[in-house]
């Protein structure tokens, strides 16, 4: 099963998010990530959905999404040239003896210290999903106390 990034442009109306999410759950498809944002048009939002499935399953999902009344356009970004970003906040155990190593990772990944206490550091990092994954894996040995990630956003290059 491959991961697909699907952009769904919708009318910005009450209940649209529930209908889109319901379409996935009714068919037993899991959403790995879901981000909703306003666009340059006041009455239009875009949902960026990351889901796993084979091409046949994803085609069915796209067809079902296109049938929803408030959906304007469905685009599978998986095969397109896109710009993608994600944000993560990671709270790690940070005794004073380990802080220089953590600071070095923060610098290498162009991350930022969002908060610091006597026992922990909270680090914010943004970038492509692979960069976020690598950063998280390098922080694991220090002891991740909390980890939050935003959903992925994806914009087609033109």
Image (spheres, rainbow, N blue to C red):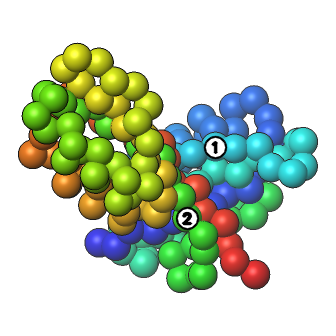
Give the residue drawn at x 60%, y 63%.
154
Give the residue drawn at x 29%, y 45%.
103
- Quarter occupied by residue 94: top left
Mark 1 or mark 2, which has the lower sequence index?
1
- Quadrant occupied by the C terminus: bottom right
- Between residues 70 and 127, which one lies in front from this camera angle? 127
- Quarter occupied by residue 83: bottom right
Q: Is residue 1 placed above or below 135 in the rendered structure?
A: below
Residue 84 position in % (x across, y down) = 55, 64
- Between residues 104 and 38, which one lies in front from this camera angle? 104
Left or right of 123 in this view: 45: right
Determine which residue is flagged by label 2: 84
Residue 147 position in % (x across, y down) = 30, 35
Q: Is residue 59 placed above or below 61 in the rendered structure?
A: below
Query: Residue 107's mark?
Result: none
- Quarter occupied by residue 130: bottom left
Residue 24 position in % (x across, y down) = 47, 49
Determine which residue is flagged by label 1: 36
Q: CA distance from mark 1 to mark 2?
A: 14 Å
């Amino acid at each position: 099963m491959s991961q697909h990034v699907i952009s769904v442009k919708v009318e910005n109306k009450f209940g649209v998010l529930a209908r889109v999410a319901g379409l996935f759950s009714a068919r037993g498809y899991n959403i790995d990530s879901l981000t909703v944002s306003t666009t340059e048009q006041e009455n239009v939002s875009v949902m960026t959905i990351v889901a796993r499935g084979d091409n046949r399953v994803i085609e069915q999902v796209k067809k079902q999404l296109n049938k929803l009344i408030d959906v304007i356009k469905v685009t599978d970004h998986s095969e397109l040239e896109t710009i993608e970003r994600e944000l993560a906040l990671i709270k790690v155990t940070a005794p004073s003896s380990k802080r220089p190593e953590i600071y070095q990772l923060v610098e290498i990944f162009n991350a930022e210290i969002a908060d610091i206490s006597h026992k922990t550091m909270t680090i914010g990092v943004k970038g492509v999903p692979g960069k976020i994954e690598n950063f998280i894996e390098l922080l694991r040995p220090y002891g991740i106390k909390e980890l939050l990630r935003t959903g992925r956003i994806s914009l087609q290059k033109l």
